[in-house]
Amino acid sequence: MPAFMNLRDIGLFLHSARTDARIERLRPTIGSAAALEAIYAADSDPWSAASARYRYQHRKYEVLISLLPPRRFARALDLGCGLGLLSRHLASRTDNVVGIDVAPSAVARARVLHADQQNLLFEAQDLLSLPSAFDGSFDLVVVADVLYYLSPLDDALLKALAMRIAALLAPDGMCMLANHYFFRLDPESRRSRRIHDAFSWSPGFVLQSEHRRPFFLTTLLQRAGGMPAAASPERRPA
Ligand SMILES: C[S@@+](CC[C@H](N)C(=O)[O-])C[C@H]1O[C@@H](n2cnc3c(N)ncnc32)[C@H](O)[C@@H]1O
């Protein structure tokens, strides 16, 4: 077991797996956004991100922050921020952080949890329809454990998303992707690999570095110079 986990953390993985299974069950009838909102309405912390009981998520956020280059960011965007725990960690390295999530209940809870942080702002937004006012206005965009909730997650959507996210960045901006990864041994890890490859090979980005840690994969990407403008990814039925 990795040093930053303890046996109790198995409970976190079981809880997260139950949450993901519930989303899969709800999605065909009510769609992705409503399924995620229903999850947050029924469970105040569906992925145990805020729970003091588990060590893993907190350590993961610390590792993600440590993988960022040693610079201070002016404005970061945390896409799919959930309860805003990672946004809060980002706030220590950033003048202002905007967290967006498709589930209004998650955003409402994040606002309460982090009301003491002046440089954190949370908005209910779907990452598939971000306002054009966001374009070019962030020097860091973080996407952690979010994209596999998009359905269907095919190569065309991933390519369009990579371009859309690159367009959110200022010329010197960077993107951090983080997703569950268990050495390609399970279907979720293979899906994570596909997500990271689509971003690494996108003309919108230049790959900076990739890091494997138990049990997640992190990729750091720099916005490509002279990048063409991106259209919003087409919204399709869930
Ligand atoms: C596993 S949680 C991760 C939360 C956070 N990134 C973290 O690492 O703690 C996934 C989050 O992605 C959000 N999400 C999924 N699809 C989204 C979308 N299309 N737009 C915005 N948020 C989305 C969900 O509502 C959920 O809060």
Image: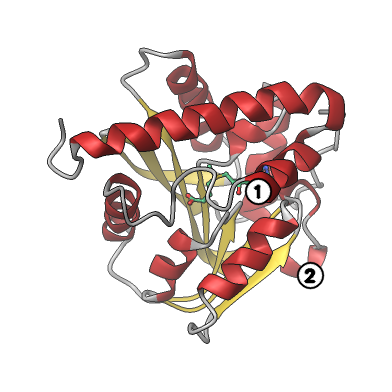
Residue 1 position (above or below residue 41): above
Asked if the beta carbon under badge 2 is closer than 8 A to the nearest atom of ligand 1, the reply is no
Whether residue 203 sits left or right of residue 177 in the image: it is right
Whether residue 196 sits left or right of residue 67 in the image: it is right
Q: Would you name the residue on which mark 2 appears?
A: 133
Quarter of the image for residue 65 reads: bottom left
> Regarding mark 2 in the picture, which secondary structure is present there?
helix
Residue 171 position (above or below residue 73): above
In percent of width and height, residue 176 lies at 45, 51
Who's the residue at 36% across and 12% down the image?
185
Residue 232 position (above or below residue 234): below
> Regarding mark 1 in the picture, which secondary structure is present there?
helix
Q: Residues within 10 Å of mark 2 (few under 14, many from 20)?
A: few
In percent of width and height, residue 213 lies at 26, 37
Residue 211 position (above or below residue 108): above
Whether residue 52 sits left or right of residue 176 in the image: it is left
Whether residue 64 sits left or right of residue 123 in the image: it is left
Who's the residue at 72% across and 37% down the image?
160
Q: CA distance from mark 1 to mark 2?
A: 28 Å
Q: Nearer the viewer, mark 1 or mark 2?
A: 1
In percent of width and height, residue 49 lies at 44, 51
Q: Nearer the viewer, residue 230 or 43?
A: 43
Protein image colouring: secondary structure
Quarter of the image for residue 77 reads: bottom right
Query: Which quadrant is home to the C terminus?
Result: top right
Who's the residue at 85% across and 37% down the image?
235
**Sequence-first tag of 1 and 2:** 1
Q: Would you name the residue on which mark 1 appears?
A: 40
Q: Residue flagged by tag 2: what amino acid is it?
A: Ala
Asked if the beta carbon under badge 1 is closer than 8 A to the nearest atom of ligand 1, the reply is yes
In percent of width and height, residue 45 lies at 52, 50
